[in-house]
Each structure stands twice: as C-alpha cells, then as structure tokens.
Amino acid sequence: MSELTDMIDEVAAEHGRAFRRCIDAEAAEIAQRARAAFVIGNPRVWWLALNGPWTRQSSVGVPIDAVLPSSCATAWFIVEDATPILPVYELSPSEVELIRCAGPALEFNYVEKQLRWMVSMSARPDSKTEVRSGWRLMSQ
C-alpha cells in the first residue's frame, strides 16, 4: 500500500463506496497491456512518452467524462506511484472525479478496457500546474 492508495481508500469510505482495486497479478497485466498500447519505453510518468498523436485540454473545471471519446460505465484507473506494481482500480468516471477532487498530487491514467483510448492527467493541488498539464487524450 502507498499513501496514494490509502487516500483513495479514504475517499471511497467518505462517500460510502468501495472502489474495486485489482489484485497485484491482474494489476500488473492490465498496466503492462496499457503501457504496450500507449507508451514508448518506461518513462517516469506515461504521458511523457505517448506512442501516438494525442490532444490536450485544460482540466480546470472540466470533469473527466467531458473529455472521454466514448461513454463507459467503468475503465481502468491506473495510479502512477513509486510501487513496483502500479495500483489499478476499476472505476466509473464519477468515481475518478471524487478522487481527483480530493486534492492531493496525483498522476493517473484512465484506460478504456478494450484499449481504444487513454486519458492521462497530472493532477496537483496547485491549479496552475493542472492548467499546464490538463487532460491528455490518446485514441487508437
């Protein structure tokens, strides 16, 4: 467990929810498949080395479901932290927003289960950083 996964668990509890976290073997496989589909090499954070064209949009006041290329009930929420196996959750867009609005610095990827698109974000409590990073959307 990391500080980020503890925070995600706290957000779930505060809202009376239980976010489904993948077990390590499943998380490792999902992250590996997503990285192979969207990322070149092994960058510190995925959005630094996306393997194809992507678009960027300001994330200030813009919920994640407004930038998704197609609606989805749930997708893979992959947290970029320092753990050997990246934490992966199965979350709805509204659950992603609960976590994003909790306020801590957080870098994540939201990946459609069939790997047709990925939205990356570097969310920081400082809105100036969020304006610079914004949503990064890549579609296959």
Image (spheres, rainbow, N blue to C red):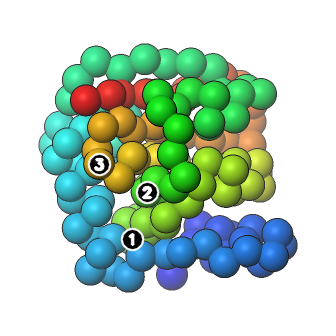
Provide the residue designation for mark 3: 114
Q: Nearer the viewer, residue 116 or 6?
A: 116
The alpha-carbon separation of the residues under discs 3 and 2 comes to 10 Å
Q: Earlier in the sequence, mark 1 or mark 3?
A: 1
Q: Which residue is mark 2?
A: 76
Residue 32, percent across and down?
21, 59
Residue type marked 2: Trp
Q: Is 82 drawn above or below residue 131 in the view shown?
A: below
The image shows residue 20, relative to residue 56, as above or below, that is: below
Give the quadrant of residue 28. bottom left
Q: Which one is nearer the viewer's eye here, 15 or 11?
A: 15
Please state which amino acid type lies under the numbered disc 3.
Gln
**Residue 68 at what x, y percent from top left?**
52, 32
Q: Position of residue 136 (x, y in %)?
A: 46, 28
Tell me which residue sits at (30%, 75%) in the image: 26
Left or right side of 53 for 65: right
* Residue found at x 26% / y 80%: 25
Callout 2–callout 1 Cβ contact below 8 Å: no
Q: CA distance from mark 1 to mark 3?
A: 25 Å
Foreground disc of the pair 2, 1: 2
Residue annotated with mark 1: 83
Q: Nearer the viewer, residue 66 or 11?
A: 66
Vertical comparison of 100 with 122: above or below: below
The image position of residue 93, as x and y in percent, is 61, 48
